[in-house]
Amino acid sequence: MLTFCIFVFYYPYSLFMGKNSFANKLSWSIIGIVSVIYLAALVIIAVIFYQLMTDEATHLSQESLAHASRMYFNLVVVGLLGLVVIFFVCRHVIKTKTRPVTEELETTSIANERMESELNVARAIQMGMLNTKFPEQLYAMLCPAKEVGGDFYDFSLKDGKLYFAIGDVSGKGVPASLMMALTSVIMRFVAGLGLPINTMLERINNSVSEANSHGMFVTLFVARLDIRSGHLEYCNAGHNPIVVIPPEGDPHFLKAKPNIAIGLLGDFHYEGESLELKPGTRLVAYTDGVTEAEQASLNQFGDDRLMSWAQAIAQENATIHDKEVVESLYQTVKHFAGDNPQNDDIAIMSLKFDPNNIMTKRRFNPIKDKSIEIIEFLMASPDMPADEELRFKLRLSIEEAVENVVRYAYDGGIGWLEVGTSLDHDALVLTVELRDAGVPFNPLEQPDPDTTSSAEERQVGGLGIYLCKKLMDSIDYRYEDGNNVLTMKKLI
Amino acid sequence: METIINNESGKTLVVLKGRIDTTNADQFQQDIAPLMEGEHPDIEIDCSEMTYTSSQGLRIFLLLQKSVNARGGKMVLRKMNPQVKEVFDITGFSNIITIL
């Protein structure tokens, strides 16, 4: 009887445990209802039978009574067997009837989950394509309205030229993001060729037009700034005008010759132009997600609010950093839109022309036998003074500092050394910086040689860093992010 | 870097031309190897055309001076350009090497 009960109650239970699918939940409910009705009927029959039996008990013989009890027991067994049969029949019927519906529901929900996870991966890939190693002069952000979007920015700083671009693909979501990926890859490639800015746009346009099967287009602003002279070359292909915040005077839009957006017409002749920026001038580039941000009442942020914002920024233009500028505009737009969801991708970029303290740097790797190349690179920096006497002292200090790294930082000279110079034009202080990832070593902690001892007592080594200390006005060492950083300064 | 060595009536006359730096310090050390030999050396080095020396060059001047002292000789450096002289002064080498 116990085995029987286990079979009857535990088996169906075990069949459902661990399966939470919709079909199983449904059939469990239906089987439950049918079983309850069946059991109720069975109990009623049993009660009636029992009453009949007890009424007749006085008239029946002992043998008949035993027969009736067996009959009663058989009834219970048959009833329970019936329950098992009902269970399997119901289950079979439900499965056959509901299969198409439940399978469709399950497939859709799996597909949705997969799509969502794929979009998240796509977003990560798109964000990963963006350059986030910002130089000192520039900061940018991208905030797509959906998981992925069609806005983008790019920049690179090489040999004193800061190239930067911002763009917006028509539409949004996945199609725009694919076009964005195509355009930014072509753009990055073309940017490395060092072409005149309008030729750059023409190359990008021809390549994108060829690959553009769906008539999409890309508005694009591309520029190249000489970070020392302030000479700005730019070309605007149908993009929103750039905001110029000069050190003095009112912010205004950068005047640009009209050119059609990228991807619409191959072989179009783009016109570039140029401008001399005054030191302290800031440029803010953005996409139409900023100016067309909407409130619930369909009011748009617009150019006027953008200019009011720029007026406010102009007050603190000298001290505020590009990152704060970008975040300030984004927060202003978000605050304006209120609870209204972001309706378009937003990209914002801010950069400032500040010829002071620009670090001209290069990383050499490996550095074995590269001392002279590294020294010559530093001596050729535009920050270096022309005065021969100063150059002599700088060269000697640089040679000693570079040699110190080349010989001792890495085992066998296999490693990198990043060197750079910067010049504070106001204080006339030249800074030379050396950074390596070699053995942590503070050369300033080494004892100075005894310059008063005789030739016989005098040690042969330890002169290099001592010369740096004596020839430069200041020398500092710090260990930072796993790097040795040596900074030497000289008033020139 | 060029090193010219002449012997004249027991005196060794040396002319140094160019720069002594990390690239040629080893070469310079080989070039002056003859000066490291012989008893009671009398060496005079014309530095008028030596335009630069790093600590690598100084190290070799110190080795040479030590060698000359050990052999009971004498050495003078002449007509040193003021910038190079300053390097010898800063490092205290002017105290142990005769610079005229």
Image: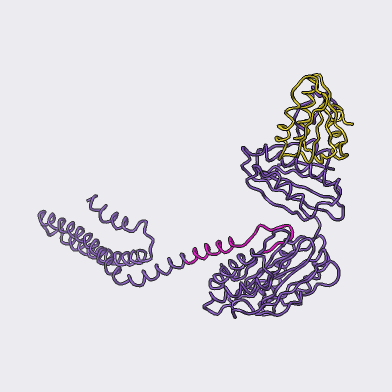
For the view shown, which residue lies furthest in the front direction? B9
What is the span of residues highlighted in magenta in the rendered image? Answer: A115-140
Q: Nearer the viewer, residue A93 or A2?
A: A93
Asked if A287 appears above or below A85 in the picture, the reply is below
* Left-right relation of A223 to A40: right
Q: Is residue A294 visible?
A: no
**Residue A106 included in the magenta stretch of the image:** no
Q: Nearer the viewer, residue A284 or A433?
A: A433
State the image coordinates of residue A257 (x, y, percent, origin top left): 73, 79
Q: Quadrant of the C terminus of chain B?
A: top right
**Residue A118 included in the magenta stretch of the image:** yes
State the image coordinates of residue A116 (x, y, percent, origin top left): 50, 66
State the image coordinates of residue B11 (x, y, percent, origin top left): 83, 26
Q: Is residue A274 visible?
A: yes
State the image coordinates of residue A475 (x, y, percent, origin top left): 80, 41
Asked if A50 appears above or below A431 in the picture, the reply is below
Asked if A176 appears above or below B76 in the picture, the reply is below
Location of residue A49 (image quadrant):
bottom left
Which chain is rendered purple in the image?
A
Q: Nearer the viewer, residue B17 or B13?
A: B13
Q: Quadrant of the N terminus of chain B?
A: top right
Location of residue A218 (image quadrant):
bottom right
Which chain is rendered yellow in the image?
B
Question: Which colour scheme appears in the figure?
Answer: by chain
Location of residue A89 (image quadrant):
bottom left
Q: How many marks?
A: 0
* Left-right relation of B75 to A12: right
